[in-house]
Image: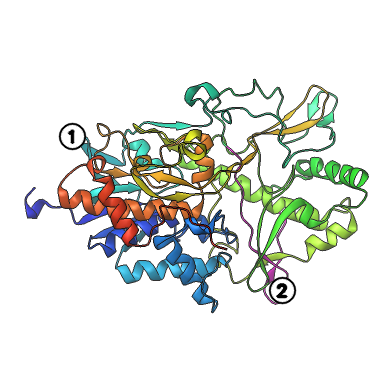
């Protein structure tokens, strides 16, 4: 390629998730010209979107630029490091890292549907956006939670759960009743004879271990505050339907009967305290912030479908908190406790104090020549092409809420299985060479549902993003496909930059 024909960027990254930001900064620090095209108006994805209580697993496995991020956040609070932080602080740090590295960030650049990718001879040459802009680069990355770029590039992918037989995974497919986030006593699913309450689907769950195309529940990680000076009341949504929360009302009544005390807010939510009287609220129990059954159409949905589902999740979550704080049927102590909390006025100021990122826990997953599976996080944990480590549980939230033959409601799909620290291979970032020679995928990586449930943590996305950034540099320098990068040399570069390849517990 003549110099005059050279693309304006060395690397173009789609989506400014935390993994995408770190990939961009890593590549730019290595001397590359880098642009990030972000569909929205913010950087950081879930890291700046409400997930302030970091899912770190064994902290000793987190190194390199991922660890640098948490140290830089800590400094904002006068600490050496922190894993628990306010959303706006996380975004500030990521913006500072991007600015220092001189990464070009293009907001409001959403991939053009169906015709957003131009390929030639197995390489992506240009990507196109709805706003009429386009990007050319030598190496592209899909750092989105949805995998839209890899899908349009014709890369093999999957959605949902493999069956146990596909990769020999004992945890795969439809799951038996789990002990966590489950109805521990019978709760009727009936609204009237022959009619189910909203949010409950006909059974059965299906044979244990079989495949399906369902994905685990999404939610919003709510940043609330009880500080009256900073508190904004959660308004009743326009499409509020109290019948949606009848299951919760019945569960609360059963809770008091079986536990001998009324339910408290912490029985219904994981309420993690963040700095300055704020929270990161997550799902807890059988009926909480997870909007079960409502995520299945999202991964392959068009933009209108996703927007509708996104709004459905807002309405559900706002309705949930409004119901608990205002419905007179809710026990008064619980009603008063929930009513003390509201949205933080100094967070998400341009989205009505509502998180700007829906927690898309899992959408598309790439299928490369190598697919990381259960054995890779349990027994075959060392890899010659290691780029970092993971250590969080195999953690899938519930997938399906259904009625049992006895008329009671049950959830299906929750999985919380500990793993030992394992090495992440470079191969998970790679599409099949014949499909895309210059594409790296640090978020929707090549793994089974079981293994994605441990890889899908924000610190790990950053670890994989840094590796993608350095791999792009090596591929461009050598004039070769990303699949041909010397993995041993990449590992050495990462280790020299502080990446962790061997777990060494501290104290």
Residue 332 screen position, x and y as percent: 89, 58
Residue positioned 28% across, 51% down in the render: 490
Residue positioned 50% across, 38% down in the render: 451
Q: Cα distance, mark 2 to mark 1? A: 58 Å
**In which quadrant of the rendered view does residue 244 lie?**
top right
Left or right of 56: which side holds 477?
Answer: left
Secondary element under disc 1, as helix, strand or loop, is loop
Relative vertical location of residue 377 with respect to residue 329 in this rendering, above or below: above
Left or right of 455: which side holds 11?
Answer: left
The residue lying toward the viewer, choosing from 236 and 223, is: 223
Residue 27 screen position, x and y as percent: 28, 58
Q: Is residue 92 visible?
A: yes
Q: Is residue 238 visible?
A: no
Residue 196 screen position, x and y as percent: 78, 29
Left or right of 481: which side holds 260?
Answer: right
Relative vertical location of residue 122 with respect to residue 274 in this rendering, above or below: above
Residue 243 screen position, x and y as percent: 79, 41
Q: In which quadrant is the C terminus drawn?
A: bottom right
Q: Which colour style is shown?
A: rainbow
Of the two numbered discs 2 and 1 on the same chain, state the one appearing first in sequence: 1
Give the labeled residue for mark 2: 227
Give the labeled residue for mark 1: 121
Q: Which residues are magenta?
A: 216-237
The residue lying toward the viewer, choosing from 304 and 392, is: 392
Residue positioned 58% across, 62% down in the render: 52
The residue lying toward the viewer, choosing from 422 and 19, is: 422
Q: Are marks 2 and 1 in contact (CB under 8 Å)?
A: no
Residue that lies at the very extreme toward the left in this rendered image: 2
Q: Residues within 10 Å of mark 2 (few under 14, many from 20)?
A: some
């Amino acid at each position: 390629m003549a110099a005059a024909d050279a693309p304006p960027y060395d690397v173009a990254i789609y989506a400014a998730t935390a993994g995408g930001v770190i990939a961009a900064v890593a590549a730019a620090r290595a001397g590359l010209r880098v642009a990030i095209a972000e569909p929205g108006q913010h950087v950081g994805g879930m890291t700046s979107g409400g997930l302030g209580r970091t899912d770190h697993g064994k902290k000793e496995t987190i190194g390199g630029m991922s660890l640098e991020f948490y140290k830089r956040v800590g400094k904002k609070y006068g600490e050496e490091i922190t894993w628990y932080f306010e959303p706006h602080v996380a975004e500030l740090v990521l913006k500072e890292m991007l600015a220092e590295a001189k990464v070009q960030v293009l907001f409001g650049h959403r991939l053009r549907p169906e015709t957003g990718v131009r390929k030639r001879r197995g390489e992506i040459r240009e990507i196109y956006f709805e706003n009429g802009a386009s990007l050319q680069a030598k190496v592209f990355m899909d750092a989105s939670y949805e995998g839209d770029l890899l899908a349009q590039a014709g890369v093999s992918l999957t959605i949902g759960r493999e069956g146990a037989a596909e990769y020999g995974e004992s945890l795969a497919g439809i799951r038996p009743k789990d002990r966590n986030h489950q109805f521990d006593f019978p709760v009727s699913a009936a609204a009237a004879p022959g009619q189910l309450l909203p949010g409950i689907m006909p059974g059965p769950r299906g044979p244990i271990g079989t495949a399906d195309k369902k994905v685990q529940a999404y939610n919003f990680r709510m940043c609330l505050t009880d500080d009256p000076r900073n508190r904004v009341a959660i308004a009743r949504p326009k499409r509020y339907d109290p019948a949606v929360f009848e299951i919760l009302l019945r569960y609360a009544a059963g809770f008091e009967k079986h536990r001998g005390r009324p339910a408290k807010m912490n029985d219904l939510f994981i309420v993690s305290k963040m700095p300055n009287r704020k929270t990161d609220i997550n799902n807890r129990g059988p009926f909480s912030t997870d909007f079960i059954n409502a995520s299945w159409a999202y991964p392959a949905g068009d933009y209108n479908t996703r927007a509708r589902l996104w709004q459905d999740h807002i309405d559900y979550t706002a309705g949930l908190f409004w119901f608990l704080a205002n419905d007179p049927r809710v026990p008064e102590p619980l009603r008063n406790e929930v009513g003390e909390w509201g949205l933080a006025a100094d967070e998400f100021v341009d989205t009505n104090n509502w998180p700007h990122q829906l927690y898309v826990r899992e959408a598309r997953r790439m299928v490369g020549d190598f697919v990381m599976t259960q054995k890779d996080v349990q027994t075959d944990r060392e890899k010659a092409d290691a780029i970092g480590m993971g250590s969080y549980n195999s953690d899938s939230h519930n997938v399906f809420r259904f009625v049992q033959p006895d008329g009671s409601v049950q959830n299906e799909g929750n999985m919380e299985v500990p793993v030992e620290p394992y090495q992440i291979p470079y191969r998970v970032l790679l599409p099949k060479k014949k499909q895309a020679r210059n594409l790296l995928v640090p978020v929707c990586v090549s793994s089974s549902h079981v293994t994605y449930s441990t890889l899908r943590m924000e610190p790990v996305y950053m670890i994989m993003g840094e590796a993608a950034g350095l791999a792009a540099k090596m591929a461009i320098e050598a004039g070769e496909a990303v699949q041909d990068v010397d993995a041993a040399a990449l590992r050495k570069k990462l280790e020299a930059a502080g990446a962790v390849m061997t777990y060494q517990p501290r104290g």
